[in-house]
Image: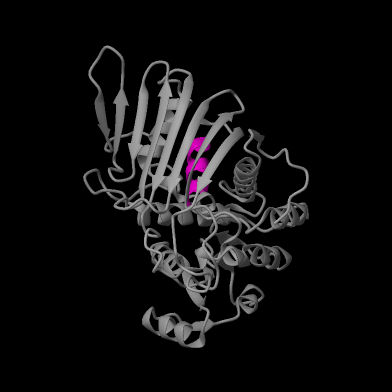
Amino acid sequence: MNPEYRVGILGFGFMGQAHLLALRQIPGVTVSVIVDRTTTKAQEKAQYWHIPHWTTDWSTVIVDSKVDVIHNCLPNKDHFLVLKAAIEANRPIFTEKPLTRTMDEADKLKRLILHPSVPKIGVNFNYRAYPMIEEMRQWVTHDKIGPVTMVQGTYLQDWLSSRQISNWRLNPQMGGPSRAMADIGSHLADLVEYVVHDNIHELWASFGQYPTVMSSDEVDGAHPDTDDFGWVMFKTTHGIQGSLTISQVAPGFKNDMQLTVVGTKCSLRWEQSQPDSLWIGETGSMNTILLRGGLPNLGSTPTALPYPAGHLIGWPTTLKSSINAFYENLRLSNQEGYSPGVAEGLHNMDIIHAALTSRDTRQWVTVGSIKEHSD
C-alpha cells in the first residue's frame, strides 16, 4: 500500500496555489497547512481552499511532526533558509528555483548536502515535462538529427513592461542580484541541457534594463536595478554552440518560449504556444509538423499524461507531472536519487552566477570556475 503524504506549502501566492491544484490531482497526497505573509491572507486563503491549518511562520511547519513533505514557494530570499531547515529536520522538500538567492548561499548549501542523511530534494524545472520536449530529447538521444551543432532558446514575457506593477522580484534584497536570468533564463538553460544531454560549459552574457523614471521608493521599496532582458551565448562541454534570449519587458509576448535544436541531418523547433507540435526541418525535402499522439515513449513514466491527443498539454499539467514524479520517486526509498534535484539546482546557480560575472567583466566565463562568490 502506498504511503500517504501530508504537505505543507510555504508561500501561497501564484505558485503556492498552482502547487495546491497540482497536488490535489495526486492520490495519497493531502495539503494540511499553508503559509502566507499575513494572518488575514493566510486565514482567508485556507478557508477558501478548505485547508485545515494555516500560519505565517514557515519554520514551524518544517518541524511539525504532522507534516511529511514541504513545498517551498516563498520568495528567493527565503530559499536557502528553508532548504537548510528542511535538511536539518530531514524533511523531503520540493522547491521552486532558483535554488538560492545568491552564490554565497549556494556555496553554503553545497556544504550542507555533504551530510550523509540528506532528505530528498526536488527542484521545479517543470518545462522538462512537456511531451514534445521529451520527444526532442529522444530524437537527440537516438541520433535521429545527427550531431547537434547549435541550439537557440528564447523566453519572452511582458508582465513587467509596466513599472506600475509591484512585485517582490523587483527588489534585489528579495529576489537576488539577477531577475530575468534567474527567473526565466534558469528554465531555458536547464531545458537546453536536458534536451541535448550536455552542460553549458562557458558563456558570454549581456543584460539590459527597461527605461524608467520611477523613484526608488515607488517599486516595492527598491529601484528595479536587476536585469530586465538579455542575451547569453554559450558553448557546451562537448562543443555545441548556442544562445539564449530572455526578456520580461517585451510588450505583447505572453510566456513566449521557443527552443530550436540544429543537427547535421535535420532541425527541431518547439514552441510553448503550440505545445503538442514539433517542427522538423530538413534540407532537400518538405518540412513537417509532428503532433502528439501515438508517440511510444510518453506513457510509461511518472510524468505520463492522462489526456489523449487533441487535448493540449499546458503549463499546469507539466507542473502536476513534475510534482507527481517527485512523489513517485519519494515512494521508492530515500536511497534513490531524484532528478532534477539539488545537483541540477546548484549547477543552474553556477550558470546564473557565470552570466552575471560575464556581464560585469565583459568576458567569456567558465561555468563553475569562480572560486569565491559574493553577493
189 in the magenta segment: yes
In which quadrant of the rendered view does residue 113 lie? bottom right
Q: Whole-percent x and y of residue 55? A: 55, 83
Q: Which residue lies furthest to the top in this view?
A: 284
Q: Is residue 298 visible?
A: no
In which quadrant of the rendered view does residue 72 lie? bottom right
9 in the magenta segment: no
* Number of numbered tags placed on the structure image: 0
Q: Whole-percent x and y of residue 112? A: 75, 57
Does residue 241 appear to the left or right of 260 in the view shown? right
Which residue: 39% across, 32% down? 260
Q: Whole-percent x and y of residue 90? A: 69, 64
Which residue: 54% across, 31% down? 197
Which residue: 58% across, 63% down? 172
In the image, the segment drawn in magenta is 184-194
Q: Can residue 230 be seen in this view?
A: yes
Of 319 and 214, nearer the camera is: 214
Q: Residue furthest front?
A: 213
Does residue 229 appear to the left or right of 368 in the view shown? left
66, above or below 246, in the image: below
Which residue: 64% across, 42% down? 354
Does residue 247 appear to the left or right of 118 in the view shown? left
Of 205 and 153, nearer the camera is: 205
Of 338 and 153, nearer the camera is: 153
319, above or below 144, in the image: below
156, above or below 38, in the image: above
Q: Is the magenta stretch mostly helix, strand or loop?
A: helix
Q: Whole-percent x and y of residue 297? A: 39, 35
